[in-house]
Image (tube, rainbow, N blue to C red):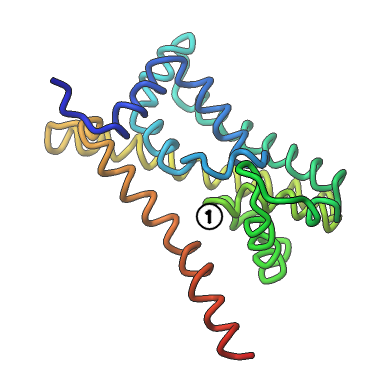
Amino acid sequence: MDHRGLIQQFIEWIIYNGGLYVLLLVIFAETGLLIGFFCPGDSLLFAAGIYTNELAKSFFGVHYSIIIIMVIVASILGNIAGFWFGNKTGPLLYQRKDSWLFKKKHLMRAHDFYEQYGRGTIFLAKFLPIVRTFAPIVAGVVKMDKKTFHLYNIAGSICWVSSMMLGGHFLQTWVENKYGYSLKDHIEIITIVIILITTLPVLYKLFFGKRKQAGSS
């Protein structure tokens, strides 16, 4: 009987079944496609960091740094795709009706975030689920300067991907050498903790931010 949780089984299935390509697709989608807002980017990146050696071996035995660079490129390209989409659709996107793939509230949340943090939104949004999907689209809608967008996009992608994947990689190495056990046996709890940490700021902003606005009006 398999005592591993569903989350751990799912992540391990991704890693061992064309894991690198699925990882690249998920990161590309989450950082620029409307359908990507529900993807578990942070936890998947950290888990991929734990499994970097396996991913590297499955891809012609390259050094794990090549895998990280490929994921960074996927993140950069995802944002470029989102920026292009927002630039082409413009204000029409705000008139689009909700569907299970598109929620206008997510777009408005990203727009409010952009209004608050300006150009830095493209960098900061990388570390916030949902917001990172819609931030490049909003940047395209408001016609953000392309050079500035690319600068923050590249910087944010490098910091986000490398911090998550290197964090997983070196923590796995340290724990295995220090205590003799593998984090691969605890992927589920690690995933849940990362999801909670990364989504709590968004939920706080969504619910308590609205209360504050209502109270001040």
- The answer to whether residue 22 is left or right of residue 176 is right
Q: In the depicted view, which residue is nearer to us: 46 or 22?
A: 22
Name the secondary structure under disc 1.
loop
Badge 1: residue crowd in 10 Å (few <14, some 14–19, many ≥20)? some
Above-or-below relation of 48 to 156: above
Above-or-below relation of 66 to 83: above
- The answer to whether residue 124 is left or right of residue 151 is left
- The answer to whether residue 54 is left or right of residue 179 is right
Which residue is tagged 1?
Answer: 128
Q: Position of residue 167 (x, y in %)?
A: 37, 42
Quadrant in the picture for the C terminus: bottom right
Q: Residue at x 63, y 32 (%)?
A: 73
Q: Residue at x 81, y 55 (%)?
A: 95
Give the residue furthest to the bottom. 216
Q: Position of residue 196 (x, y in %)?
A: 36, 55
Q: Position of residue 31 (x, y in %)?
A: 62, 42
Dividing the picture into quarters, in which one does residue 2 lie? top left
Above-or-below relation of 80 to 66: below
Amino acid bearing label 1: Leu
Give the residue furthest to the top. 60
Q: Residue at x 53, y 67 (%)?
A: 206
